[in-house]
């Protein structure tokens, strides 16, 4: 995410599902096949709502499946909740909080702080701050690479942090405006370049961009998730969904999806890609084969719930959002101002149960 309002998410394009220029699957119907139809209803729905204290904007959310903790960016803090009950367990100071990268192997977490261009290193058990690291540029999303044990707080010029020492390990010039990132766990970090309609491929050891994958008809690529088994990248664009071959950058398939996407997740067991959008829905895209993807369901959530975290253990999806209201301007010729309702911040739990 980038260039967002100071008080929370913003809508860039009108709500809708139109896909004017995007290539869809062939219109001709294949020869009739035999066999049992594939189940398309996933059963997902909003099952719980965790009320979270405090006001202020929000951004990314992360989940630690093993410890059953949620890390929610909210105002100038990361609020840590019990992932099953929603109980507030503690918080980490993070001025202008954008998100959290978790390193369970080191029991350390890393916040991306937009206000003072820094990363806060904290203990995942106690939530105590270990160190604050100043960055050369700003930051938004943040990614941990377990292969090199390095942290990548996203910026056009990334200040890379050694996760073990908290020291600066070097920098990477992406050559574009980054959004989401994903590590393959083998020494590569993929980064969406929103202004370039492309994905940058970063060598996390050498700290350099080795390739850039251009994506035709992909304005402002935002969400990014990764299928390690089949080496596929899933990119959410303004026009729709794109699946890429992670080794070559080749566009494998495209699909319809919701508008104003900002985050995604991939269920490796059920081969489902989830794309969360600010219009208040999650698009569910089924990986029919590694080279074929079809939208199968739209899950209603809530307006502005556009960032998400997928829990691979419970299969739950968590989305932060807030109620809003419009306040008339003193000048009747000017449009009213939108603001978030005080005390309405919530984390939605979308579940099959």
Image (spheres, grey):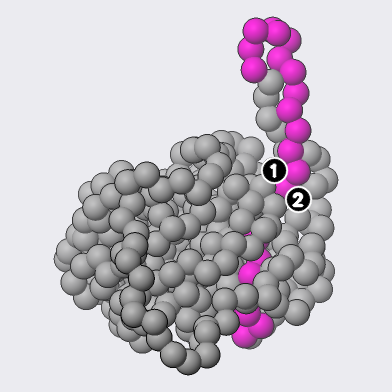
User: Hey, which quadrant is residue 299 in on the image?
Assistant: bottom right
The kind of secondary structure the magenta stretch mainly shows is loop
> Is residue 323 highlighted in magenta?
yes
Q: Earlier in the sequence, mark 1 or mark 2?
A: 1
Indicate yes or no whether the magenta region holds residue 31: no
- For the point 80% across and 40% down, the residue is 342
How far apart marks 1 and 2 lie (CA) works out to 9 Å
1 and 2 marks in contact (CB < 8 Å): yes
Q: Please name the residue that numbered disc 2 is placed on.
A: 345
Evaluate whether residue 299 shows in this view: yes
Residue 205 sits above or below residue 99 on the image: below
* In this picture, residue 176 sits left or right of residue 79: left
Q: Is residue 124 among the parts visible in the rendering?
A: no
Q: Residue furthest front?
A: 32
Q: Is residue 246 left or right of residue 74?
A: left
| Magenta segment | 312-335
Name the image quarter holding the C terminus: bottom right
Tag 2 secondary structure: loop
Residue at the bottom extreme, as displayed: 35
- Within 10 Å of disc 2 (Cα), the crowding (few <14, some 14-19, many 20+) is many
Which residue is identified by label 1?
A: 56
Residue 167, position as x, y percentages in the image: 39, 66
Nearer-the-camera pick, 32 or 26: 32
At 33% from the left and 51% from the top, the residue drawn is: 22
């Amino acid at each position: 995410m980038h260039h967002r309002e100071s008080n929370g998410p913003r809508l860039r394009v009108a709500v809708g599902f139109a896909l004017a220029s995007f290539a869809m699957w062939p219109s001709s119907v294949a020869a009739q096949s035999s066999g049992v139809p594939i189940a398309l209803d996933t059963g997902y729905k909003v099952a719980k709502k965790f009320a979270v204290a405090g006001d202020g904007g929000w951004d990314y959310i992360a989940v630690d499946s093993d410890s059953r903790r949620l890390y929610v960016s909210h105002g100038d803090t990361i609020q840590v909740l019990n992932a099953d009950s929603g109980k507030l367990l503690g918080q980490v100071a993070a001025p202008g909080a954008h998100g959290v990268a978790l390193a369970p192997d080191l029991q350390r977490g890393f916040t991306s702080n937009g206000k003072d261009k820094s990363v806060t290193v904290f203990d995942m058990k106690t939530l105590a701050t270990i160190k604050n690291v100043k960055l050369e540029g700003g930051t938004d999303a943040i990614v941990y690479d377990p292969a090199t044990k390095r942290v990548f707080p996203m910026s056009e010029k990334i200040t890379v942090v050694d996760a073990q020492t908290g020291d600066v390990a070097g920098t990477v010039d992406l050559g574009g405006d980054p959004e989401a990132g994903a590590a393959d766990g083998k020494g590569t970090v993929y980064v969406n370049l929103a202004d370039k309609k492309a994905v940058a491929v970063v060598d996390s050891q050498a700290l350099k961009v080795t390739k850039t994958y251009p994506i035709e008809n992909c304005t402002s690529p935002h969400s990014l998730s990764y299928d390690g088994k089949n080496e596929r990248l899933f990119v959410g664009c303004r026009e729709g969904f794109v699946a890429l071959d992670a080794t070559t950058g080749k566009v494998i398939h495209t699909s319809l999806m919701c508008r104003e996407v900002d985050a995604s997740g991939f269920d490796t067991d059920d081969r489902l890609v989830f794309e969360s959008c600010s219009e208040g829905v999650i698009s569910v895209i089924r990986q029919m084969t590694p080279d074929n993807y079809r939208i199968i369901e739209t899950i209603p959530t809530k307006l502005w719930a556009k960032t998400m975290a997928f829990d691979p253990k419970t299969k739950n999806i968590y989305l932060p959002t807030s109620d809003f209201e419009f306040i008339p301007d003193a000048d009747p010729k000017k449009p009213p101002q939108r603001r978030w309702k005080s005390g309405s911040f919530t984390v939605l739990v979308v579940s099959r149960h």
